[in-house]
Image (cartoon, coloured by chain):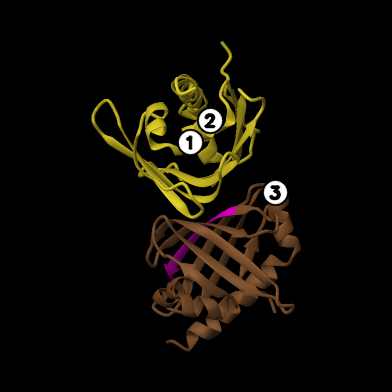
Chain colours: A brown, B yellow
Amino acid sequence: MEPKTKVHAEDGKQELTITREFDLPLELLFRAYIDPEIVEQWMSTKVLKLDNQKQGGYQFETTDPKGNKHGFSGTIHEFVPDQKITRTFEMENTGFGVQLEFLEFEALTDDTSKLSMHIVYRSVAQRDQYLQIGMSKGMNMAHNRLQEIVNKLK
Amino acid sequence: MEPKTKVHAEDGKQELTITREFDLPLELLFRAYIDPEIVEQWMSTKVLKLDNQKQGGYQFETTDPKGNKHGFSGTIHEFVPDQKITRTFEMENTGFGVQLEFLEFEALTDDTSKLSMHIVYRSVAQRDQYLQIGMSKGMNMAHNRLQEIVNKLK
């Protein structure tokens, strides 16, 4: 089955665009990105900090099957409820580098909505490294979980 | 006279690299980026906020000759004293967009130091727009002021 999360990567560019349509009202889709309890479920992570505001920041932590902890964190440059989040993102202590993410949320109908992400990387090599570790598949699976979990809140 | 601040822009890329060598010890060069009073002088701006730490942020404001106020702001993703600052930057309400900046500081000798900046833009067009408004010349002039002002602190 074709993944519902579409990742577009142009050769030689240091950016990616990602789109996903959800069978969720806009407000619920946006809530999945700002409510710590919901984030923990679909991202399979622990939320240590999630300060949803301009010049805020976030800190997540996952534990792998071997018990090792991995940190993910960033700052929130811009925050407009139900519309957009501009933030930095980094997988800490990995050498993957810092990236800049533009998330845009829009209603398609009363019951459906769309997420558009534009990610800018420090280099083409860093972007390609993310693609090589299976980012597209991982993001599609996470978005499937988001759809399933948030669907229960309707 | 050739500008001391070197801006390197490769065609068709959404990034810039900038280097400048200063006749200043590393500690004084770094201080010029974190001490509000010194920032105000060489950047010709008012510092409303400058929270120099990981997940911190800053807010500057300049007043143009007509009395109009212009905001410049961003988040600080990473902060390592005397070594590096990774931050976002935006000229507010201009449509110029948000950019990601990697600033690296290094000592060349006891009395000289080097700043290396890598700026990543949302698009090639946004980068080119900055070049068109004379960013290179403006940055060189600002760095000249930095050299002159901080020199008095030696």
Q: Are marks 3 and 2 on the same chain?
A: no
Find numbered disc 3 in the image and state the secondary structure of the residue it sits on. helix
Q: Would you say B106 lies left or right of A59 here?
A: right
Q: Looking at the image, which residue is at 41% across and 31% down?
A: B38
Q: Which residue is mark 3?
A: A124
Q: What amino acid does circle 2 point to?
A: Leu
| For discs 3 and 1, the disc positioned in front in the rendered view | 1
* Residue B116 placement: quadrant: top right
Q: Which residue is mark 2?
A: B29
Q: Which residue is mark 1?
A: B33
What residue range appears in magenta? A99-108
Q: Chain of mark 3?
A: A
Q: Would you say A142 lies left or right of A37 here?
A: right
Q: Chain of mark 1?
A: B
Find the distance from the CA under tag 2 to the CA under tag 1: 7 Å
Residue B100 on image: x %, y %: 54, 46
Residue A103 falls within the magenta-colored stretch? yes
Q: Nearer the viewer, residue A30 or B106?
A: B106
